[in-house]
Image (cartoon, rainbow, N blue to C red):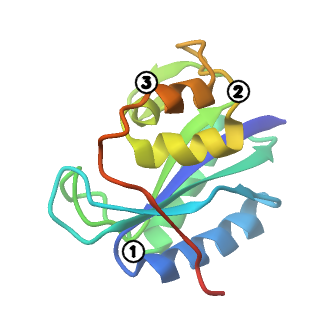
Amino acid sequence: MAEVYVSVGSNIEPERQVRSCLRALRERFGYLRVSTIYRSKAVGFTGADFLNLVVQFDIDEDVRQVVSSLHAFEEVHGRHRDGPKFSNRSLDLDLLLYDDIVLAEPGLRLPREEITRYAFVLRPLAELAGERRHPVLGRTFSELWQAMAADGEPLIPIKLEE
C-alpha cells in the first residue's frame, strides 16, 4: 500500500466544493486523514480567497491511476484546464507525495515542488506528516514548516458547516 498526500484547493464556491470533494474522495479511496482547512489569499493573481487543506490515504494503485482519478474529480467539479496557471479554481487537486517516490516526467513531478514554495501547502502537510521526511531534501515536513518565512500571507483556520 502506498501512502498518498493530496492538496485540495478551491476559491469558487469553496465551502461547497471542498465538502463535495471530501465526500467523493472518501467514496473512491476510503478512509481519509484530513488536515485543518485554511483560508488564504489567491497567489499569482487577484481573486477570491482560497480554502486549502491536505488529505492522506493509503492506496494499492499505480501513481498514474491516482493522478487520473484526481483529474476526473476536478473535471466533475467544474475544473477547466485550458485557462492560465494562476486563476480561479472550482477544485484543484495536486498529488504531493506518493510514498517516497521521486519522479519527473511530463505532467507529473514528485514530490510536488509547491510543498516548499507555498505555506498553504506545507502547513497542512506538516500537520499530517510532520515527522515524515521530504524524499529529496531529507528534512522533516515539520522542520521545513518551521523554516518557512512567517511573513507571508496569513493562513486562517476555518471549520466548514456540515
How dense is the environment of label 1, judged by Cα within 10 Å: few (below 14), some, or many (20 and up)? some
Amino acid type of the residue that numbered disc 2 sits on in the rendered structure: Arg
Q: Secondary structure at mark 3?
A: strand
For marks 2 and 1 on the same chain, the one whose residue lies earlier in the sequence: 1
- The residue depicted at 30 percent of the width and 51 percent of the height is 153
Q: Is residue 55 above or below residue 133?
A: below
- Residue 52 seen from this side: yes
Q: Is residue 77 left or right of residue 83?
A: right
For marks 3 and 2 on the same chain, the one whose residue lies earlier in the sequence: 3
Which residue is under mark 2? 132
Amino acid type of the residue that numbered disc 1 sits on in the rendered structure: Gly
For marks 3 and 1 on the same chain, the one whose residue lies earlier in the sequence: 1
Q: Quadrant of the N terminus?
A: top right
Distance from label 3 to label 2 (Cα)?
A: 24 Å
Q: Secondary structure at mark 1?
A: loop
**Camera-nearest residue between 154 and 41:** 154
In the displayed orientation, state which residue is furthest to the front.
151
Marker disc for residue 147: none
Q: Is residue 131 left or right of residue 18?
A: right
Distance from label 3 to label 1 (Cα)?
A: 26 Å
Of circles 2 and 1, which is in front? 2
Which residue is under mark 3? 105
Q: Position of residue 32 (x, y in %)?
A: 76, 58
Q: Is residue 18 left or right of residue 61?
A: left
Q: Position of residue 129 (x, y in %)?
A: 69, 37
Q: Position of residue 104 (x, y in %)?
A: 45, 21
How dense is the environment of label 2, judged by Cα within 10 Å: few (below 14), some, or many (20 and up)? some
Labels 3 & 2 near each other (Cβ < 8 A): no
Which residue is under mark 1? 78
Q: Is residue 28 above or below residue 162?
A: above
Amino acid type of the residue that numbered disc 3 sits on in the rendered structure: Glu
Question: To which quarter of the image does residue 159 belong?
Answer: bottom right
